[in-house]
Image (cartoon, grey):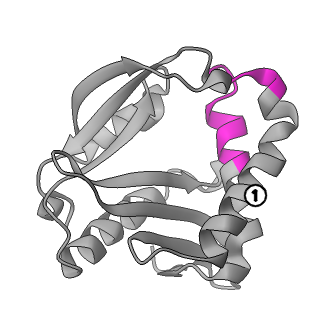
Amino acid sequence: MADIIYRPAQAADALTIAAIHIASWRDAYRSILDPAFLAGPIEEDRRSHWLGKLSTPSPDFLVDVASTGDGTLVGFAATQRNLDRRWGSLVDNLHVLPEMRGRKIGATLLRSAARKLASQQAAEGLHLWVFEANEPALGFYKRLGGQVVERTISQIPTENGRTILRVHWPALSALF
């Protein structure tokens, strides 16, 4: 999209990234995650997470943001380079504000992350975990060529033992 600007995240973006993450989870996971978690504790959890990640960034943890022309952040993608020998780099998070979905922002962020990983000589392969019940996200990843290669039960308490799926792209270039 011409009116969306993509750039690397900065430490100053942490709280806005957390707010996007919270809004996305509350929308997409309202029937998946523990409602008590979504009602309140998610806020401190995500703020703490992103302040920590962006205040002392690891060179292998890459975060890019999408913003409107006026600088308002509307989405982000975070990847962990070469996290798994078999599956490659991990898409740790990919979120777009609910009201901005359907504008190819998520696809652009994911493709950009794959190109950036390739430019940094990341090993082949990209993967992520998605809730099986999150059918819109699963369909999105499949449309972008991701293949479900593993199914397991989440061990995270707030996820209520939900089934999660590993989606994999064997080659980063599949997303270019």
108 vs 141: above or below: below
Q: Position of residue 41 (x, y in %)?
A: 84, 38
Q: Is residue 74 magenta?
A: no
Q: Is residue 105 visible?
A: yes
Q: Position of residue 91 (x, y in %)?
A: 39, 53
Kind of residue indicated by mark 1: Ser
Residue visible at 82% across and 48% down in the picture: 43
Magenta region, main secondary structure: helix
Looking at the rendered structure, the secondary structure element under dot 1 is helix
Q: Position of residue 155 (x, y in %)?
A: 52, 22
156 vs 10: above or below: above
In the depicted view, which residue is nearer to us: 143 or 17?
17
Segment tinted magenta in the rendering: 22-36
Is 37 left or right of 106, judged from the image as shown?
right
Q: Position of residue 84 (x, y in %)?
A: 25, 50
Residue that mark 1 sits on: 48
75 vs 32: above or below: below
Residue visible at 41% across and 65% down in the picture: 109
| Dot 1 crowding, Cα within 10 Å, few <14, some 14–19, many 20+ | some
Is 95 left or right of 165, judged from the image as shown?
right
Residue visible at 45% across and 73% down in the picture: 1
Residue visible at 19% across and 73% down in the picture: 118
Q: Is residue 31 magenta?
A: yes
What count of labels does the image hold?
1
Is 74 left or right of 42, judged from the image as shown?
left
Q: Quadrant of residue 75?
A: bottom right
Q: Is residue 19 visible?
A: no
Q: Quadrant of residue 15?
A: bottom right
Q: Quadrant of the C terminus?
A: bottom left
